[in-house]
Amino acid sequence: MLDEGEVITIGSDGCVRIWDFETIDTADVIDETGLLEIEPINELQVDKNVKLFSMIKMNEVGNNFWLAQDSNGAIWKLDLSFSNITQDPECLFSFHSGAIEALAVSPVTYLMATTGLDCSIRFYDFAGKIPLLQMKFKQGGTALAWVPRLISYGGAQITAGFEDGVVRILELYDPKGLTVFVGRKKVSEADIRLKQVFKPHTAAITALAYDRDGEVLATGSKDKTVFFFEVERDYKPIGYITTPGPVCQLTWSSSSHPESTLLIICENGYVLEAPFPAIKEEEEDHDVVSYEIKDMCLKYFHFTSVKSKILRLIEIERRKKQKELKEKEKQERRKRLETEMGEDAEWELQEEDEEEEEEEEPLPEIFVPSTPCHILCGFYSEPGKFWISLFGIETEPIPEDIEDPKAYSIENARRKREHDKLMKEVEEIKAGKRERIKALRNQLQKLLQMNEELPKHMQFKRTVSLK
């Protein structure tokens, strides 16, 4: 950017460089390469691991302050006066550099924790509206769960899951009592320490859940497994179960339920209900061949689309009501015509029936998408019942491709439909005429028979003209 005769450049190396515009504008190339090497007037290294990609000048008279945006999620205030009283770069705000993957709120105070794929966990005092601290890791965070007070009475522990399948138990600590005074005064001495770490999964952890009594921690992952840990014995592994799809949420039943059960929600339309895992007596880990729990009694629920079935039933009901209405109108008209026309009413009604007869359109086909909608979330509503929320609507059937090179064009197809419609109408007219002639013949036969039954002197002769 150009500012008061100077060119200012920034880069992902975290440096701000100032160049003289006139020097650049009047420079001549001295060789065939077309390259010219010049030195900047001034240079500022903002900080380590800073990647600048945007900068704007602050509107302060007498100062040369700029706001710079860091792709790592920070906003920096930079003094580009380059004098003896130049201020050091100041980080005004620090955020996640990407989407927030998980959020957890403290059960006892005004603390909130967030994590994302930028490999950081950040803590905020949302009552005081200030960020407290952050901790960086080598892998991105994907799940968070605040440890219940039954386990950590002070409410200062949090469980975090990462994209490499690792679970870390972290603890906030402050000698002046962070959990008591947070939200009432500015706390600057808070820090985080690692309490425990273990790796139960081979893919990103997507869900963490403590049971209602704080005895068991369940972890779910994209590797299609759910692992159980005994909290009281330093998160000793109990075992794991496999699921039919990647796990997206884990929810334990509340105290209103007679038994403690775990609702396992998978992305691909499956929901499982697992009982509280059996905790075995003391035994050494080296005696365990595998942690897989094969005898756990699981309930499986698989959800598929019912949209097409509902639409079909709605259409059947609509046609039924329409048919009943038409039949009612027809009966009323029949009574009216019989009153007005007598015996001729039957012929009139027969002609109307022939005109009204239409070929019924086929019912909508039942279509079940091969890939069901992803389940976003779910929860227990009451004992024995749960609700789930699906993402979006099911995909409509894929249209059939045109593979025949002799297939009709849009215009020719339209003309063919019109021709077929016309031919159908002609055939219907012919069929109607044939039925009419047949009826007239039957009537003539009845008249002839009646004529034969009359006395001979009253019979019509076939040679007699009726004109």
Image: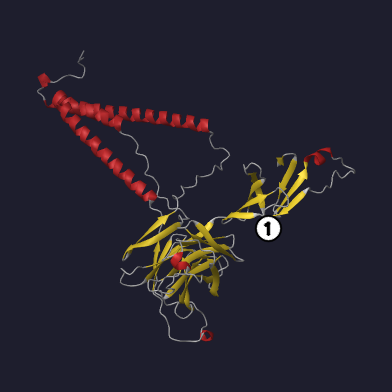
Q: For mark 1, what is the residue?
A: 47
Q: Residues within 10 Å of mark 1 (few under 14, many from 20)?
A: some
Task: Give the image location of residue 40, x and y in percent.
Answer: 79, 48
Task: Give the image location of residue 85, x and y in percent.
Answer: 70, 52
Q: Is residue 169 placed above or below 134 in the rendered structure?
A: below
Task: Give the image location of residue 120, x and y in percent.
Answer: 57, 62
Task: Give the image location of residue 364, x and y in percent.
Answer: 38, 45
- 317 or 166: which is nearer to us? 166
Total of numbered circles in the picture?
A: 1
| In this picture, residue 116 sits left or right of residue 309 | right
| In this picture, residue 243 sits left or right of residue 326 | right
Residue located farthest toward the top when viewing the structure as drawn: 467
Q: Amino acid at mark 1?
A: Asp
The secondary structure type at the circle numbered 1 is loop
Is residue 36 in sight in this rendering? yes
- 264 or 301: which is nearer to us? 264
Q: Residue at x 26, y 29 (%)?
A: 352
Is residue 451 in sight in this rendering? no
- What's the coloring here? secondary structure
Q: Residue at x 46, y 76 (%)?
A: 229
